[in-house]
Every structure is written in C-alpha cells, then in structure tokens.
Image (tube, helix red, strand yellow):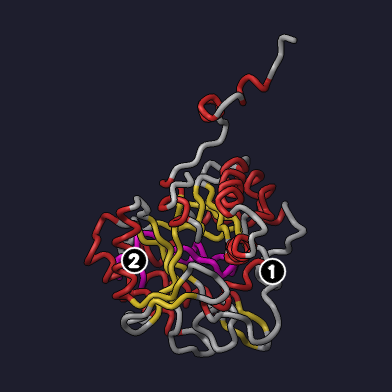
Amino acid sequence: MKNRPRRLRKNAIIRNLVAETRLNKEMFIYPYFVVKGENVKHEIEAMPGVYHFSIDMLLKEVEEVLKLGLNKILLFGVGEDKSEDGHTSHDHNSIVAEAVRALKANFADQIYIITDICLCAYTTHGHCGVIEQDYVQNDVTLHILAKMALTHAEAGADMVAPSDMMDGRVSEIRDLLDENGYSNTGLMSYSIKYASSYYGPFREAANSSPQKGDRKSYQMDFRGVGDALREAKLDEEEGADILMVKPALAYLDIIRALKENTHLPVACYNVSGEYSMVKNAAKAGLINEEGLVMENMYAFARAGADIIITYHARDIVEKGWL
C-alpha cells in the first residue's frame, strides 16, 4: 500500500509539523466588563470565571494578563444610569471612558483597547437604539452611537466596535471620528450579528436584556447567508477595518463565506452562551474542558477567522493549552 495518510499522524511531533491550521495568542481578544465603584471583582453567576471589575481591580487584572502575553482587550460598560435614549453612553465621565484613560495611563502602548459601541446597556428598555412609535429608530440612533465612539476615542481607545446592527452606523462613526482628528482610530464592525439564543449569559453580565420584544428587526435572521455577506460588504464600503461574525460556533459556515468574500481581517466572537455551556459541562464532569475549548478554537481558525474574541483566552494561555 503506497498511500498511507496515517504516516503523518504517527506522533505529536509529525502532527504538529504538518498541521494545516495554527493558533497563537496574538489572535485572541479578551473581553472585560467594567463597573463603577472600588475594590469590585464580582464573579458573574451565568459566566463562571468571568467578573465585573471596578477600574482599580481591572488595572490589577490587566497587569497580570499582559504578563501572559494577552494585550488586546474589549471593554463593556455596566451600571451607568439608564434613559430612553441612552445618552450616558457618550458621557465623557462614563465608566468605559474612565477605564480607557486609566488603562492608557498605566500601560500606554503595552495594551490595545477596543470598546463596544451599543446602547443596550444604557437604555431603560434594553434595546440597541432609540425607540419611537414602538420601533427602534435607525437614523436617530446613529448620531448617539457616533458620539459614543468619539467619546471613547478621545479617552484613548485604539479601536471602536459597533455592535448595534443599525444600518449605516459604520459610515456615521467613521465620518465623526475623522472630522475630529481620530482618523487613526480603528473600527471593527460587528458586521454579521445574528439574533441568537447564545447571548443569554451576556445579557445578565451587561444588564442589557430587552424589556419588551426582541432584537430580530435589526439583528440578523439566522436562516440567511446572502444577507450576511451583503451586510459585511456594506460595512467594508463604509470604512470598517475588521469584519466580525457573531456568534461563532454555530456560524462556522458564515465565517468561511465571509473569509472568501473579503480581503479585510475576519474576527469571530465566541459568545457567552458558547462559553458558559463549556464551563458548566466541564464542571459537571461531562466533557474535558481543555479538549473542547481547543477544538472550538481550531474550528474558528479553520473556518477562516484571523481574530478570536473569547472569554477562554486567559485559561488557554495561562494553563498552557495552546
């Protein structure tokens, strides 16, 4: 028998040599939830191993992960005063803006800070935009999102990441940033964000559940592929630097399709539900946590993701899974 594919699977050395898909820690972005107060490090019940951090405790945490080589973070603000229009999202003293300033003051260019741009954690109704006539209004929301992005850029954010799924928000944000001298601030768009049941634990973490209805009128129908590629193309034309698919695990086909239809870097978000299912299954002794986490990570990369946003990042690096 001349052809024996098993020769290249004989041991770990040869398997590693010929591996088609490779991962490294430079691909990971680590999300954090920042809250007001002092000396706060509170584990989020729905997301084992993930915490709410006050700024002082976040600084200690980031100092530790920088030593591990994790130097890209995604910030979410929690606990601001809520209103119908979410105006506290662009307050210059918002918790995210304060956190960005503190991180940059302490770590400067050692860290790359990305901030989430969305109104869901800042509105009384929990939707990602302004509601008028019982409908999330697109164009009114754009102006608020752009102000939020500018506030974060002024605080020192390296990149902003709109996750709201309003039409035209990439263009609106890019224009306002450029007009105010922040043309070098990057923009990673949640270009393909599905209306998914995988977001449940995050909504507890960010206190951002809709009080009425759902988000299906602006987040994407999970039955579609063509619409996803159309959304991504529009964001690319409007000036996005990175395109993202969210969630990741159930949308590997979408990651692949996007990779084949853009020259921009492709990111995927390994979301809260995906994370918590693994953590809880491991806690129950049902699965091998390391094995399943790494199988998922390689699946994302194999599908075409250049960047992986994941709550598993610290475990992967600190525990030597990579």
Where does residue 39 sit, x and y in percent of width and height? 32, 80
* Residue 199 lies in quadrant: bottom right
Q: Amino acid at mark 2?
A: Glu
- In the rendering, which numbered label is found on residue 197? 1
Quarter of the image for the N terminus: give it. top right
Residue stretch rendered in magenta on the structure: 151-173
Which residue appears at 35% of the width and 58% of the height?
65
Q: Is residue 239 visible?
A: no
Q: Residues within 10 Å of mark 1 (few under 14, many from 20)?
A: few
Q: On the rendered structure, is 157 left or right of 214?
A: left
* Foreground of the two, 233 or 23: 23
How many numbered marks appear? 2
Q: Name the mark nearer the viewer: 2 or 1.
A: 2
* Residue 204 lies in quadrant: bottom right
Magenta stretch contains residue 12: no
Q: Which residue is mark 2?
A: 61
Q: Residues within 10 Å of mark 2 (few under 14, many from 20)?
A: some
